[in-house]
Image (cartoon, rainbow, N blue to C red):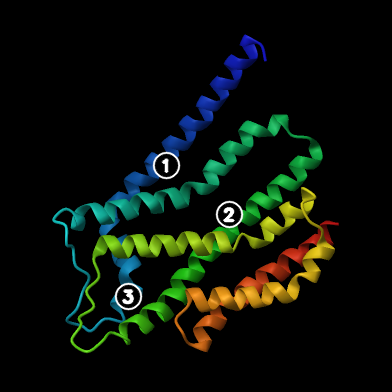
Amino acid sequence: MNQTATTRFLIELRKRLVWSLVFLSALLLITIYFANSLYTWLALPLLKQLPSAQHLVAINIVSAFFTPVEFAFYVAVFLAIPVFIYQAWAFVAPALYAHEKRLFWPLILASIVLFYVGISFAYFIIFPILFAFLAHTVPVGVQLTPDVNQYLDFTLSLFFIFGFIFEIPVLIILLVKTKITTRQKLVHLRPYVIVGAFVVGMLVAPPDVLSQTLVALPLWWLYEIGVFLLRILK
C-alpha cells in the first residue's frame, strides 16, 4: 500500500468514525435528558414484584446520579448500533466482491433485528419471571432492597447474554459459509442441541418447568431457523 492509498484509507476511516461519534453524541444528549425515566423503565420488572414499601437503594452517594446516566449511555449505544454497522459497511464495501455484498447485508440486518429481539425477550419475558421468583423466595426476616448500580450491572449482563444468544441463526450461517461445518452435521446434532437448550434453561431460568421451558424453546427454535435458512441460501 503506497503513501497515497494509506492517506486515503486513514481519511476514510476517520470520516466514518467521526460520523459514528457525532450520531452517538446526539443520541446521548437525548437519552441523558430522560436518564431517570429510562432507569425507572428498566427497574419496573423488579419494582412490580417488590412490596409497596420497598424500593431500590443507592448505597453509594453518587449512584443515584451516575447510574441512570450510565444506563442512558448504554441506551444510546444500543440505538446507535445500526449506524455503527452502516459506517463499517460503507468503509469495507469497496473491498468486497459482489457475492460477498449480497450475503453481507441480509446477515447484518438479521443480526441487528435478532439482537434487539433478544433484548426485548429478556425484558418482557425473562425479567418478570425471574424477579417474581426471586421476590417470592426471600427468607423470612430478609428484606430485598437491591442497589441501583448492582441492578444495572445484572440487567445489562442479561441483555447482552440474550442479545447474543439470539444471534444463533446468523452464527450457523457463517459457520457453514466459512466451511467450518455443514448443514448435514448440524441436522445430526439436533438431539444434542435440544438437550443443551434445556440445560441452559435450567442454568439461567428459575427452578420451575415453565421458566426453564420459556428459555429453552427459543434457543432450540433459533437453531432450527438457522438450519432452515441454510436450505434457502443453498
Residue 126 at x, y = what percent?
A: 46, 75
What's the distance in space between the residues labelled 1 and 2, CA to CA?
17 Å
Q: Residues within 10 Å of mark 1 (few under 14, many from 20)?
A: many
Q: Residues within 10 Å of mark 2 (few under 14, many from 20)?
A: some
Determine the residue positioned at 38% across, 40% down.
25
Q: Amino acid at mark 2?
A: Ile
Q: Amino acid at mark 3?
A: Leu
Q: In terms of depth relative to the viewer, which is nearer, 48 or 150?
A: 150
Determine the residue positioned at 70% across, 51% down.
106
Occupied quadrant, residue 56? bottom left
What's the distance in space between the residues labelled 3 and 2, CA to CA?
27 Å
Q: Give the left or right position of residue 13, taking residue 174 as reference.
A: left
Residue at the disc numbered 3: 46
Circle nearer the N terminus (3, 2): 3
Disc marking residue 233 = none
Residue 145 at x, y = what percent?
A: 22, 74
Circle nearer the N terminus (1, 3): 1
Residue at the disc numbered 1: 24
Label 2 element class = helix
Determine the residue positioned at 23% across, 84% down.
51
Q: Residue furthest top?
A: 3
What's the distance in space between the residues labelled 1 and 3, CA to CA?
29 Å
Residue 87 at x, y = what percent?
A: 57, 37
Q: Give the left or right position of residue 170, taking residue 166 as reference.
A: right
Q: Residues within 10 Å of mark 3 (few under 14, many from 20)?
A: many
Disc marking residue 112 = 2
Residue 191 at x, y = what percent?
A: 73, 76
- Image height of 38 relative to 55, above or below: above
Q: Amino acid at mark 1?
A: Leu
